[in-house]
Image (tube, rainbow, N blue to C red):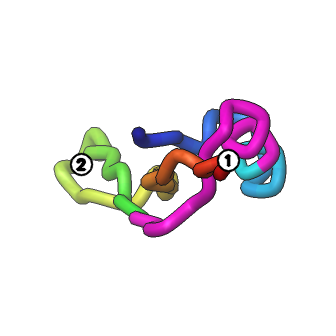
Amino acid sequence: MKFKVEDGETIQDCLTRMREAGYMPIKRFEKPVFKENKDGSIEVLKQDIIFTGKKISTE
């Protein structure tokens, strides 16, 4: 299952949310979000962080 760090949320908040849902992080992806300016130039607007989670087994 994938968990995205939402706007206004810290990485720790996202990890806590994952833990409460019963998942532990196994991979982290960072993807830039670009913005095109009026003059045609492109700049990085923000960085999306997405964690892939694995279900915590309770054996």
The residues tagged by marks 2 and 1 sit, at their Cα atoms, a distance apart of: 55 Å
Which x, y percent locates residue 25? 57, 60
Quadrant for residue 32, please give it.
Answer: bottom left
Q: Is residue 52 left or right of residue 16?
A: left
Q: Quadrant of the N terminus?
A: top left
Q: Nearer the viewer, residue 50 or 16?
A: 16
Q: Is 3 placed above or below 34 here?
A: above
Query: Which three-letter amino acid code belongs to the residue tagged 2?
Result: Asp
Q: Is 6 placed above or below 45 here?
A: above
Which residue extends farthest left?
40
Label 2–label 1 contact, CB within 8 A:
no
Crowding at dot 2, Cα within 10 Å, few <14 / some 14-19 / many 20+, comes out as few
Which residue extends farthest front?
59
Q: Is residue 7 left or right of residue 47?
A: right
- The residue at 50%/55% (across/down) is 51
Query: Which three-letter amino acid code belongs to the residue tagged 1?
Result: Thr
Crowding at dot 1, Cα within 10 Å, few <14 / some 14-19 / many 20+, comes out as few
Which x, y percent locates residue 7? 66, 34
**Mark drawn on residue 42:** none
Residues rendered magenta in the picture: 16-29
Q: Is 29 placed above or below 12 here?
A: below
**Mark drawn on residue 39:** 2
Looking at marks 2 and 1 on the same chain, the residue that comes earlier in the sequence is marked by 2
- The residue at 42%/65% (across/down) is 30
Disc 1: which residue: 58
Which x, y percent locates residue 29? 40, 64
Secondary structure under badge 2? loop
Which x, y percent locates residue 39? 24, 48
